[in-house]
């Protein structure tokens, strides 16, 4: 899941953005056309071609050339390289430890799913392994720590997100935080808060934890527990208070569903009273286990409009509210909510948050089940720069072909589309309003007439039947 984000650009900003990209491309090709785009920019007047050995005429380039030269570093011009160990793809030494020189890519984040186990069973849980966590198991302590250390050595991640399952269910969370500290990186922890103790909070306060993100789906026990299970509301509130008492940052999260969209203001009030002002206003995204509850929980456009309308005044009054799963602009005009930040799917960009699964597999994100590769046999650097990642954005749903927002939106959340339909179709949040057969299947399921079986559940059933 993507935590950082940008507002979609308005028309003039888009035009400028396109111009800049064209100009950049032209500069790369050293052509004269660059002048045309840059002429339109007030701070980028054209200059005579003969003064610009590269053929580029923008002011920015002149400023760069005119700047006094600082003493070049002995490593100037040398690509950043590092030495790392790999498992069993060549070259390998007989003792299993060997080295290779590779450039170190920079990426936004790595979400590490420490365990498949969780003390709650939330209806909106996007983990594919939620159904049978025991079957999935988890890596041994030694393998897990080695992988995390290698990930941070081989790729420069802005931060690491520790998640699960419930990450505090795994005591090694503190060993991992020590590794993150050693690499001078930082961590975000996604937890349900229910098993956090004062001892946890004390230790977290000494480690590089930006915040712990905890979800509330209702302002009181009945609505919250309708989403996550009986007896979970008070432990979650206790977890939040304990962290705050020990000066550990807490960020709130609300998963907007059909059931709680109209209670968003009340939930935000609870967060504000607790002293939590950074909020991830996530919206239900049917992937993994959550697809079984799609009819019950998928919010409609009107539900989303209601939730955002309720949240906007809180944003205006100082809370930082960010919608962390994409809401495609064909569903919601994000300009109506100027105090809420929106994001789009970051896969294939430098803002991507990769997921390292409980069995050690690397995936596109926490919602995706597609495996990019096995970092136990291939370097993280190779995996995050693989063609599978680079070409992810080349595929967009047929429905989106004429859409001017296609390049940034790419059809919304591809992981949920794949989970529900079996292919990268348009996001179910859009499909429920444009795909008649899907809409009628959801409606029938809501009336109790016929259950809707999403593609991932169908695959699981077939697999289980074949094993029986
Ligand atoms: S790309 Fe597709 S989902 Fe996104 S705004 Fe356009 S039509 Fe909607
Ligand atoms: S596929 Fe969905 S969950 Fe994954 S990064 Fe894209 S928008 Fe986020």
Image (cartoon, rainbow, N blue to C red):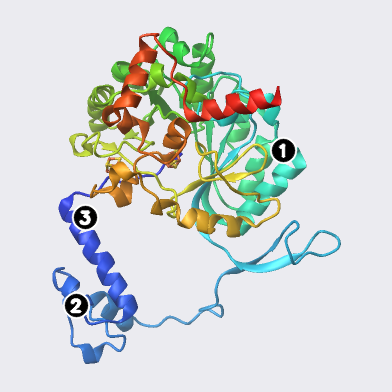
The label shown at residue 139 is 1
- Upstream in sequence: badge 2 or badge 1: 2
> In the rendering, at what x and y percent does residue 435 appear?
30, 30
- Provide the secondary structure element on which disc 1 rests: loop
Could you tell whether 352 is left or right of 323 in the image? right
Q: Which residue is depicted at the point 24% across and 47% down?
A: 403
The vertical placement of 450 against 256, above or below, is above
- Provide the secondary structure element on which disc 2 rests: helix
The label shown at residue 14 is 3
> Cβ–Cβ below 8 Å for labels 1 and 3?
no
Q: Which residue is depicted at the point 39% across and 38% down?
A: 413
Visible in this render: residue 269?
no
Q: Classify residue 438 by image quadrant.
A: top left
Q: Which residue is depicted at the point 29% across and 49% down?
A: 406
Direction right: furthest residue: 94
Alpha-carbon span between mark 1 and mark 3: 45 Å
Q: For ligand 1, which image quadrant applies?
A: top left
- Packing grade of label 2 (10 A; few <14, some 14-19, many >=20) is many
Alpha-carbon span between mark 2 and mark 1: 56 Å
- Packing grade of label 3 (10 A; few <14, some 14-19, many >=20) is few
Could you tell whether 313 is left or right of 95 in the image? left
Query: Looking at mark 3, is its residue's CB closer than 8 Å to ligand 1?
Result: no
Query: Looking at mark 2, is its residue's CB closer than 8 Å to ligand 1?
Result: no
> In the rendering, at what x and y percent does residue 66 appear?
30, 83
Quadrant the C terminus occupies: top right
Residue bearing mark 2: 35
Q: Nearer the viewer, residue 12 or 445?
A: 445
> Cβ–Cβ below 8 Å for labels 2 and 1?
no
> In the rendering, at what x and y percent does residue 199 appear?
64, 26
Visible in this render: residue 284?
yes
Q: Nearer the viewer, residue 102 or 450?
A: 450
- Upstream in sequence: badge 2 or badge 3: 3
């Amino acid at each position: 899941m993507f935590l950082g984000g940008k507002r979609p650009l308005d028309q003039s900003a888009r035009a400028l953005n396109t111009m800049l990209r064209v100009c950049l491309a032209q500069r790369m090709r050293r052509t004269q056309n660059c002048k045309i785009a840059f002429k339109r920019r007030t701070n980028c007047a054209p200059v005579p071609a003969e003064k610009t050995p590269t053929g580029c005429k923008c002011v920015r380039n002149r400023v760069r050339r005119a700047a006094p030269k600082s003493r070049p570093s002995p490593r100037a011009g040398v690509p950043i390289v590092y030495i790392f160990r790999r498992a069993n793809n060549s070259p390998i030494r007989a003792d299993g430890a060997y080295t290779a020189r590779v450039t170190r890519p920079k990426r936004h984040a790595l979400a590490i799913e420490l365990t498949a186990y969780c003390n709650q069973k939330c209806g909106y849980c996007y983990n594919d392994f939620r159904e049978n966590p025991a079957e999935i198991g988890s890596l041994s302590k030694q393998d897990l720590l080695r992988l995390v250390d290698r990930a941070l050595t081989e790729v420069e991640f802005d931060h690491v997100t520790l998640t699960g399952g419930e990450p505090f269910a795994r005591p090694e969370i503190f060993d991992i935080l020590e590794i993150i500290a050693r690499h001078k990186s930082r961590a975000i922890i996604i937890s349900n808060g229910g098993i956090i103790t004062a001892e946890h909070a004390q230790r977290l306060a000494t480690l590089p934890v930006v915040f712990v993100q905890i979800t509330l789906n209702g302002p009181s026990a009945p609505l919250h527990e309708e989403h996550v299970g009986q007896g979970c509301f008070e432990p979650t509130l206790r977890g939040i208070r304990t962290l705050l008492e020990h000066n550990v940052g807490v960020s709130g999260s609300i998963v907007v569903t059909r059931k709680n969209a109209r209670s968003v203001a009340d939930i935000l009030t609870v967060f504000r009273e607790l002293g939590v002002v950074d909020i991830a206003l996530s919206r239900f995204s049917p992937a993994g286990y959550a697809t079984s509850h799609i009819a019950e929980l998928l919010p409609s456009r009107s539900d989303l409009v209601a939730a955002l309308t309720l949240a906007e005044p809180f944003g205006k009054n100082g809370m930082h509210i960010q919608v962390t799963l994409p809401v495609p602009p064909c569903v919601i005009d994000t300009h109506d909510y100027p105090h809420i930040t929106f994001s789009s799917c970051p896969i294939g960009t430098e803002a991507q948050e990769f997921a390292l699964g409980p069995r050690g597999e690397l995936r596109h994100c926490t919602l995706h089940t597609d495996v990019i590769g096995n970092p136990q046999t291939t370097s993280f650097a190779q995996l995050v720069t693989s063609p599978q990642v680079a070409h992810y954005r080349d595929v967009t749903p047929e429905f989106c072909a004429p859409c001017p927002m296609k390049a940034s939106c790419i059809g919304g959340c591809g992981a949920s589309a794949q989970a529900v339909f079996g292919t990268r179709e348009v996001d179910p949040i859009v499909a429920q309003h444009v795909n008649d057969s899907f809409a009628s299947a959801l409606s029938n399921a809501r009336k109790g007439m016929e259950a809707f079986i999403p593609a991932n559940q169908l695959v699981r059933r077939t697999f289980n039947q074949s094993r029986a």
